[in-house]
Image (cartoon, helix red, strand yellow):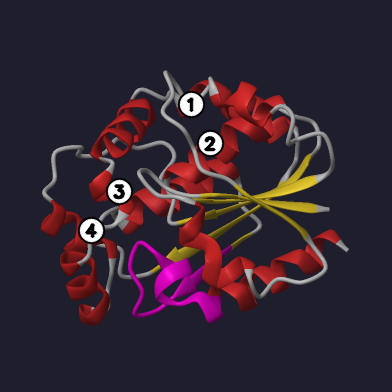
Amino acid sequence: MQLIFIHGAGGSHLNWLLITRKLKNFKIVNIDLPISESIENYEKFFKAILNEDSIIIGHSMGGAVGYYLSVVFDRIKGLVIINSAIFDKFDIDLSKNEICERLYFSKKLIDDCKRRDYLMFKNSQLLKNHLEILNKFDAYKYIEKFLKKNLKAFHIIGENDKLVPIESLLKTSNLLNVIRNYFISECGHMPHIEKPDEVLRILKDIFIYFN
């Protein structure tokens, strides 16, 4: 079983390193999403990757991409989303400081985000493109096909998300009929960076469902 990690808007495979470096006995596929015309167009990008049984772990926008891929590819056996509001739209006109304030619960991480020139800020066109294709993605169009597949789906939620309302996260969970919501306290929109050990513990618990 391979694990496919999909980052959020403007992110990269580096977002997952605190998780992936500690996972053993799995084939890890950690990708960088390119600029695209639509989320549906990522089907071509993933075609060569999704040729064996897989579990997708997607953060935020990556959850929406994983949701779509779960509909069109048969080798996906499970979907784990992290702070992903697949059925909602997002503000795409935020300053760097506003983004940093909303990404994290920890003041230390917020301050660090403001000081550093992270990839999402260096390559603002990538972030802009990702948010644009996310906002035009009609997730409701695929919900019936997704539910018919009876995939095992789970949602990991940082309880103190200031970027996406908790109501939107729970709406996604309800629509996807997830097996379980896992809540992480004192954690914002980026649990895999803010609370990696807790996310890793949860993932190992989820993987038991696939044994």
Corner quadrant of residue 20? bottom right
Q: Which residue is mark 2?
A: 65
> Which callout, 2 or 3, points to the residue nearer the camera?
3
Task: Tell me where residue 114 appears, x and y as whole percent.
Answer: 16, 65
Q: Which residue is mark 3?
A: 120
1 or 4: tag closer to the N-terminus: 1
The span from disc 2 to disc 3 (Cα, nearest Å) is 18 Å
Task: Tell me where residue 205 appears, x and y as whole percent.
Answer: 71, 73
Residue drawn at (48%, 59%) of the image:
14
Q: Give the side of residue 74 with respect to residue 116, left or right.
A: right
Mark 1 is surrounded, within 10 Å at the Cα level, by few (under 14), some (14 to 19) or many (20 or more) other residues, namely many
Residues at discs 2 and 3 in contact (Cβ within 8 Å): no
Q: Is residue 22 above or below residue 71?
A: below
Instruction: Indicate the amino acid at tag 4.
Output: Asp
Q: Give the side of residue 140 with respect to residue 75, left or right.
A: left
Residue drawn at (52%, 20%) of the image:
141
3 or 1: tag closer to the N-terminus: 1
Residues at discs 2 and 1 in contact (Cβ within 8 Å): yes
Residue drawn at (73%, 36%) of the image:
49
Which residues make up the magenta segment? 181-198
The span from disc 1 to disc 4 (Cα, nearest Å) is 26 Å
